[in-house]
Image (cartoon, grey):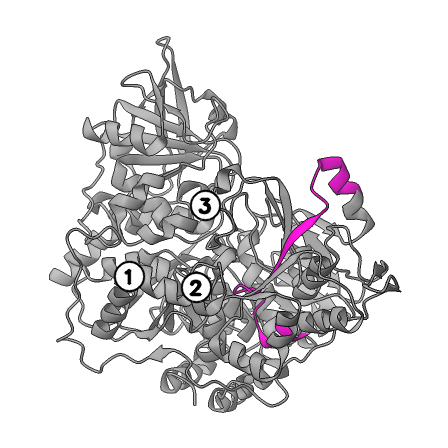
């Protein structure tokens, strides 16, 4: 039986009336995305048609999911909100703080030792406030959500950008910062700009070596890392319905890499099969009663150009396996000769040292079974493994079932390391090197979602390429980046030429899923007696102090850093070893922007201190400005804040005294996080004005007292030679968001409202 089945049935009970009304108000057939959005309006029944990409709308999500790295700050904020219990079903999943090194048993024991303080804090807070808790080793948040909580037609938010994975079960699931989650936990509306809609029509059928992963790798090539910003991507067509539910999840998961608000698929038989296989026949039965409301109206998919802002066509029968990377998930290369040429031209290492299979993107039973079919062929045909291989199962249920069915043993016979059911190398929790910064140049292939520099192992010289699990397995066995398993032969241990056959696998386990202990702890019905302790001298946890308003007078501000090129949330607040400080704002602030490239010297963590004229680390220089009461600004390039939903990338600069972030363009989640923390997130009205910013500038905001929706702001940049430049700045703040700014943060406003 499903968790929260009464809530799910309640969503379906309202759906027909609300969607029918929305269709009447909008005056045309509706996409699936629109049906879900209009069914989750905070005010209930629709009364107006919203303008895509313009109107801010209040929504009422059905549930919240948090992973341990982001849950710390989210729950520290919720503790200030004045509530005794969360208002909607919420879960916490411990998957980020487990480092991959020696294998599952040893690594999990080590994590439970070094992070016990954090795990105990999260368990106690969850127990106190009515939150479901998934213990370390239970699985990766998004796989666990897909198996237990996702349901067709639902709306979920989560404090991780890959929350979008649940679109594989027909949800609108959106990654947010912790402050957004706190709003919903506290029983308040959640605000989102009504998304634009991108339709992806899938025709043909996947076969052979081509996998669902190749679909999203192709979409990433087409749209690039920012082409989906502000939009929901809705997949449809015969190619969509022919695909497995977990395959759909893979595609939705990596929608985060194109900046999409989320991605989704209409309810179909593969979703019903998955629900029943994961012991949720009650959800499937309820969904079947309203299934016409759990997909788009027929006219939409028949004539998509009339209903979507953009339509992309992909013929799955013509799609081949792809490798995306290095250093960005949208640089796509067809496996084989094209990679040979591109690698030679760009000096990418051809020898592959590691293959990694798993992460929230590709760790299902189907993924492991297809990859193991390649591993089994290597054993049967006498092919020696050339690279090392690591496996991260997606959940304890997947791991237990895969072990029962002999899948994991196949990998172990090739000397693969079976890591914990956790994120591991995907988020930088990989003890690959003792000195990552000085590690050698190399290539790895993985089935993860992101491949930014230093992302997996901390080594800036690791060239990481993204592929399907089966291609990852084949390339790891061959040990060459340009290996094409469809055409290339390998020499086995007997000196014979052999080739791989096409991968095979199971959509769902033939004998059903099985697990002895799934790792779930239910909260007490009344947690009022539960004590949450945070030691004053803790290095891992720190109770929060409210931010003071920045105010409407910013004069004499200094430039902290002008970031050059790609500046993701990994550059602003690195993961890896820094994850241990995610619950301690002061300590983690010591990594603020240390990965960003200074436009004036092309170095990282090396900026000019205008008080001394000397150069130093970004956090060190900023702390000196803060000690003197001097406000600062950060300047950035395109798609600033791309990547993870981590709100630390906003909270850390805010904590250190940065008043404004001014860029050419923002990634959606990061812009919202800046607003939530009471900061100014602004864009150049003329992108070329980025070039006017000089290293020794001082800044005055001329008209901040007139801060209002739709009104430009003016920045005066006073240069070292006494000349001045007036720079026009745009923003997307509505009045509610300006109220957050004036209050010092959205949380300050929540506390004030709860106290009144």
Work out whether 21 lies above or below 190: below
**Helix, strand or loop for disc 1:** helix
Query: Magenta stretch?
Result: 341-369
Q: Residue at x 65, y 51 (%)?
A: 353
**As rendered, which of 414 and 509 lies closer to the eye?**
414
Q: Report the mark closest to the observer, 2 or 1.
A: 2
Residue 527 locus on image (x, y percent): 18, 77
Q: Can you see residue 259? A: yes
Mark identifier at residue 577: none
Of the image marks 2 and 3, the number of the one nearer the N terminus: 2
**Residue linked to disc 2:** 107
- Residue 118 circle label: 1
Q: Where residue 455 sits: x, y (%)?
A: 51, 48
- Extreme residue in the top direction: 721
Left-right relation of 6 to 443: left
Does residue 371 appear left or right of residue 753 in this picture?
right
Q: Nearer the viewer, residue 5 or 313?
A: 5
Q: How many marks?
A: 3
Residue ID for mark 3? 570
In the foreground, 722 or 487: 487
């Amino acid at each position: 039986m499903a968790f929260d089945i009464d809530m799910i049935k309640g969503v379906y009970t309202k759906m027909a009336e609300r969607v029918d009304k929305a269709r009447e108000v909008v005056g045309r057939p509706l996409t699936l995305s629109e049906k879900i959005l209009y069914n989750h309006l905070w005010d209930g029944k629709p009364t107006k048609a919203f303008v895509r990409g313009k109107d801010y709308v209040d929504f009422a999500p059905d549930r919240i999911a948090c992973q341990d790295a982001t849950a710390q700050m989210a729950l520290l904020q919720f503790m200030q909100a004045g509530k005794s219990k969360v208002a909607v079903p919420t879960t916490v999943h411990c998957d980020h703080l487990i480092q991959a090194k020696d294998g599952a048993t040893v690594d999990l024991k080590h994590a439970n030792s070094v992070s016990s303080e954090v795990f105990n804090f999260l368990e106690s807070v969850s127990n106190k406030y009515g939150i479901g808790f998934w213990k370390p080793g239970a699985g990766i948040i998004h796989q666990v959500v897909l198996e237990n909580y996702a349901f067709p037609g639902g709306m979920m938010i989560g404090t991780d950008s890959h929350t979008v994975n649940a679109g594989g079960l027909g949800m609108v699931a959106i990654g947010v910062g912790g402050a957004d989650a706190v709003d919903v936990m506290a029983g308040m509306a959640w605000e989102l700009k009504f998304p634009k809609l991108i339709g992806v029509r899938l025709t043909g059928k996947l076969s052979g070596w081509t996998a669902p992963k190749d679909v999203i790798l192709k979409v990433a090539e087409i749209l690039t890392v920012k082409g989906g910003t502000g939009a929901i991507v809705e997949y449809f067509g015969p190619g969509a319905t022919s695909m497995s539910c977990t395959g759909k999840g893979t595609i939705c998961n990596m929608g985060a890499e194109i900046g999409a608000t989320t991605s989704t698929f209409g309810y179909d038989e593969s979703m019903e099969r998955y629900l029943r296989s994961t012991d949720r026949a009650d959800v499937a039965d309820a969904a079947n009663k309203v299934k016409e409301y759990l997909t788009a109206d027929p006219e939409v998919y028949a004539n998509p150009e009339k209903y979507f802002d953009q339509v992309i066509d992909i013929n799955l029968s013509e799609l081949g396996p792809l490798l995306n990377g290095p250093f960005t998930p949208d640089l796509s290369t067809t496996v084989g000769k094209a990679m040979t040429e591109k690698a030679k031209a760009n000096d990418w290492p051809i020898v592959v040292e590691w293959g990694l299979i798993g992460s929230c993107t590709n760790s299902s039973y189907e993924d492991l079974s297809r990859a193991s079919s390649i591993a089994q062929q290597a054993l049967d045909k006498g092919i020696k493994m050339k690279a090392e291989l690591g496996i991260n199962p997606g959940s304890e249920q997947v791991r237990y079932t895969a072990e029962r069915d002999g899948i994991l043993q196949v990998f172990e016979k090739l000397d693969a390391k079976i890591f914990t059911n956790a994120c591991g190398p995907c988020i930088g929790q990989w003890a690959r090197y003792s000195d990552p910064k000085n590690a050698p140049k190399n290539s790895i292939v993985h089935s993860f979602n992101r491949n930014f520099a230093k992302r997996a192992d901390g080594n800036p010289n690791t060239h990481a390429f993204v592929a399907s699990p089966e291609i990852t397995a084949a390339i790891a066995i061959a040990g060459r980046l340009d290996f094409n398993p469809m055409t290339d032969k390998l020499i086995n241990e007997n000196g014979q030429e052999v080739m791989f056959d096409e991968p095979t696998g199971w959509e769902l386990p033939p004998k059903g899923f099985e697990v002895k202990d799934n790792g779930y702890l239910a909260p007490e019905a009344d947690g009022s007696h539960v004590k949450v302790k945070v030691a004053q001298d803790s290095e891992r946890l720190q109770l929060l102090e409210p931010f003071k308003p920045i105010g409407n007078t910013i004069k004499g501000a200094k430039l902290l850093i002008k970031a050059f090129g790609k500046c993701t949330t990994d550059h602003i607040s690195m993961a890896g070893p820094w994850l241990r400080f995610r619950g301690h704002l002061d300590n983690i602030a010591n990594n603020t922007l240390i990965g960003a490239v200074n436009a004036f010297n092309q170095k990282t963590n090396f900026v000019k201190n205008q008080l001394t004229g000397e150069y130093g680390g970004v956090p060190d220089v900023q702390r000196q400005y803060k000690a003197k009461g001097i406000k600062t600004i950060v300047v950035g390039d395109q798609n600033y804040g791309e990547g993870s939903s981590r709100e630390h990338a906003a909270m850390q600069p805010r904590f250190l005294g940065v008043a404004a972030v001014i860029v050419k363009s923002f990634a959606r989640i990061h812009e919202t996080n800046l607003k939530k923390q009471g900061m100014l997130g602004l864009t150049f009205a003329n992108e070329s004005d980025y070039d006017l910013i000089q290293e020794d500038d001082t800044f005055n905001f001329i008209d901040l007292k007139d801060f209002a929706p739709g009104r430009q702001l003016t920045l005066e940049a006073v240069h070292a030679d006494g000349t001045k430049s007036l720079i026009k700045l745009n923003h997307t703040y509505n009045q509610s968001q300006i109220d957050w700014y004036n209050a010092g943060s959205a949380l300050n406003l929540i506390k004030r409202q709860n106290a009144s």
